[in-house]
Image (cartoon, coloured by chain):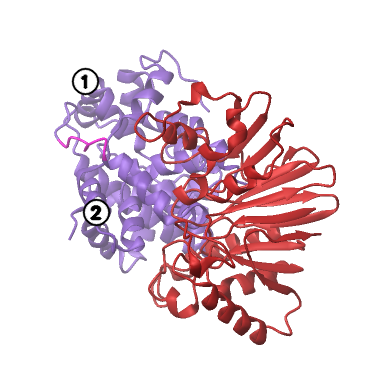
């Protein structure tokens, strides 16, 4: 973990606040629907949870707690279902849904729908990149989850540090500086630090913590972080949704050599990239 | 190791003329070690019959392991009479419910409320001690070692491996082996299957080489067709488990409430014929019957 200097946000306060954080409107609505129908399919429930970073975070937090003594951390909702049972996961999702819904009109002026599309497309791209690199099927969901959760810190800021986050968003847009730099200035920590801090507190897999922490790093080391870096930039370059940050970063040398090409070449070599966007969109608009 | 079935019925007690042979009490298994430690698996209505056999003049030390908190596995707890006499030591063990965030103490707290029971927990004569267990972490109860494993059911459910005096037993509680929720042609099928296979391997390892494997075998194959996802196993899934675990003796339990003695006899006869060459013995769990290992 990078040390957090001059933080205006108390870490314990941040952790306590996130407990009460509601999930995105569409998934809350769908979970309530699905859990009111005894014949609803487990597949649909898994799909809804996997399309919502807040639901995903809260379920992983429970399943990875020391009380379930896992020999290996669980990053995937599917694995969580197999390990602890569908009905338990369904009821955990329902308890998240009962908190209420994330207000799309937050005081930060942060577009949560566009953010969700960015997160979901980054997740799907990150998973595809893992497949491309020959990662075993069972581990590819770790890459999806890293993509889904990499910007989780932003949605926390929008909810609980709205005023400071609004300033950071404005400064980033006006001066064309990366948002994470403006966050550090306005909030005292950036979204990757906030996300990693939470993931570490909740005993998530260390590789996932590191990937969230270093997804803007100048030279990401691990394959998961490298794929996440690339997926994040591809999603931004293609303007799939909006993460609040328009600055597209070039691939660092490690990422360049991993794929044997730079950002633009990688996008050009990808035939069905836009279908990822339409699939993600269908998840979040409930069609 | 002595094992006595005190309750073998699933869901609801079924007293009456059609259940006299196998018994109508809900789940409870009594285990005695060589030095007479008392280990109890689940506290269905069968625990009351168990309590009737304990000498009221002697102090009782009981270790009660709850597989899960569905009613038929806890409803006998308030009627375990040693809790009303001073000087007894009752330890109750179970998991932490991921949904409520509460431990096994809740199963008494919920039942001993004014509307449902005349006595409050504070009025009990014996102090109950509650212990939250972690999956895979072995605990000691007297001379026995007990290890919980999470098994699939519509609530957190622990299967328990009990070891003492060089012998071992595994009880599943209520368990439906996990199955793939995706069709073979769906993109998520293979990944999900890899998680299922890993879980089944973990379960097989937890049961490996036991003297007695006691399994929730609620349904026939035909009945299971309309009960998938309800959280219970079949005679077939129990047989598969016993073969994989290299168990010496398999007990079918958690009999359906509507299953008569006659039907259980008929099913048992059929299972014996079909599995006469199985490398393990099979038995229908029957209330009041004691086995020594």
Which comes before the other along the chain, label 2 or label 1?
2
Which residue does the image show at 50% across and 76% down from the upper left? B220
For numbered disc 2, what is the local secondary structure? loop
The chain letter corresponding to red is B
Magenta span contains residue A49: no
Q: Name the residue under label 1.
A: A163
Query: x%, y% of residue A40?
Result: 28, 62
**Which residue is outermost to the left?**
A105
Which residue does the image show at 45% across and 57% down from the upper left? B11
Q: Is the magenta region chiefly helix, strand or loop?
A: loop
Q: Mark 2 points at which residue?
A: A36
Q: The numbered mark 2 sits on a residue in which chain?
A: A
Closest to the camera, between mark 2 and mark 1, is 2
- Taking the image as drawn, is residue B218 in sight? no
Q: Do the residues labelled 2 and 1 touch (CB within 8 Å)?
A: no
- Taking the image as drawn, is residue A78 in sight? yes
Q: The numbered mark 1 sits on a residue in which chain?
A: A
Nearest the camera: B49 or B115? B49
The chain letter corresponding to purple is A
Relative to B285, say whether A183 is above or below: above
Which residue does the image show at 58% across and 39% down from the upper left? B80
Relative to B18, say whether A191 is above or below: above
10 Å neighbourhood of mark 2: few (<14), some, or many (≥20)? few
Magenta span contains residue A99: yes
- Tell me which segment is drawn in magenta: A98-104
Nearest the camera: B280 or A125? B280
Query: x%, y% of residue A126?
Result: 41, 54
Q: Is residue B17 left or right of residue B285?
A: left
The image quadrant of residue A24 is top left
**Which residue is outermost to the bottom?**
B273
Relative to B211, say whether B266 is above or below: below
The quadrant of the rendering that contains the C terminus of chain B is bottom right
């Amino acid at each position: 973990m990078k040390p957090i200097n001059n933080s205006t946000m108390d870490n314990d306060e941040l952790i306590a606040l996130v407990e009460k954080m509601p999930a995105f409107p569409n998934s809350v609505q769908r979970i309530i629907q699905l859990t009111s129908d005894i014949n609803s399919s487990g597949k649909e429930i898994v799909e809804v949870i996997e399309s919502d970073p807040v639901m995903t975070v809260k379920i992983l937090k429970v399943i990875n707690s020391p009380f379930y003594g896992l020999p290996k951390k669980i990053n995937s909702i599917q694995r969580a279902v197999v390990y602890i049972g569908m009905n338990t996961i369904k009821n955990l999702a329902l308890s998240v849904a009962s908190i209420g819904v994330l207000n799309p009109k937050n005081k930060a002026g942060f577009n949560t729908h566009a953010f969700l599309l960015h997160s979901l497309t980054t997740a799907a791209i990150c998973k595809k990149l893992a497949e491309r690199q020959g990662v075993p099927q069972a581990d590819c969901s770790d890459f999806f989850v890293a993509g889904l959760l990499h910007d989780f810190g932003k949605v926390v800021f929008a909810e609980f540090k709205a005023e400071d986050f609004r300033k950071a968003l404005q400064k980033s847009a006006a001066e064309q500086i990366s948002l994470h730099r403006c966050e550090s200035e306005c909030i005292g920590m950036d979204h990757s630090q906030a996300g990693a801090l939470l993931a570490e507190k909740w005993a998530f897999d260390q590789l996932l913590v590191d990937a969230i922490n270093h997804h803007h790093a100048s030279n990401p080391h691990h394959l998961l972080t490298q794929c996440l870096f690339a997926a994040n930039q591809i999603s931004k370059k293609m303007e799939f949704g909006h993460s609040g940050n328009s600055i597209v970063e070039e691939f660092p040398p490690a990422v360049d050599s991993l794929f044997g090409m730079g950002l633009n070449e990688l996008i050009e070599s990808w035939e069905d990239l836009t279908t990822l966007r339409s699939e993600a969109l269908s998840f979040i608009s409930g069609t | 190791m002595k094992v006595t079935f005190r309750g073998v019925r699933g869901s609801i007690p079924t007293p009456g003329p059609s259940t006299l042979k196998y018994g109508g009490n809900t789940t409870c298994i009594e285990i005695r070690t060589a030095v007479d430690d008392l280990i109890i698996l689940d506290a269905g209505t069968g625990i009351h019959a168990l309590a009737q056999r304990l000498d009221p003049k002697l102090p009782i030390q009981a270790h009660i392991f709850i597989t899960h908190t569905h009613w038929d596995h806890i409803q006998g707890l308030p009627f375990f009479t040693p809790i009303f006499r001073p000087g007894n030591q009752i330890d109750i063990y179970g998991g932490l419910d991921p949904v409520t965030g509460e431990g096994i103490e809740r199963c008494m707290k919920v039942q001993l409320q004014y509307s449902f029971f005349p006595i409050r927990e504070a009025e009990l004569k014996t102090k109950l001690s509650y212990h939250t267990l972690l999956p895979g972490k072995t605990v000691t109860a007297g001379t026995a070692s007990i290890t919980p494993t999470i098994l699939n059911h519509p609530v957190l459910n622990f299967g328990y491996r009990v070891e003492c005096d060089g012998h071992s037993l595994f009880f599943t509680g209520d368990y439906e082996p996990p199955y793939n929720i995706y069709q073979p042609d769906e993109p998520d099928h293979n990944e999900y299957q890899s998680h299922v296979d890993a879980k089944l391997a973990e379960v097989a390892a937890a049961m490996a080489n036991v003297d007695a494997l006691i399994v929730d075998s609620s349904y026939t194959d035909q009945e299971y067709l309309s009960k998938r996802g309800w959280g219970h196993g079949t005679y077939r899934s129990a047989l598969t488990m016993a073969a994989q675990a290299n168990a010496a003796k398999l007990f079918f339990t958690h009999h359906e409430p509507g299953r008569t003695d006659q039907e259980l006899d008929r099913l048992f006869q059929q299972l014996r014929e079909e599995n006469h060459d199985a490398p393990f013995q099979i038995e229908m769990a029957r209330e009041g019957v004691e086995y020594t290992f």
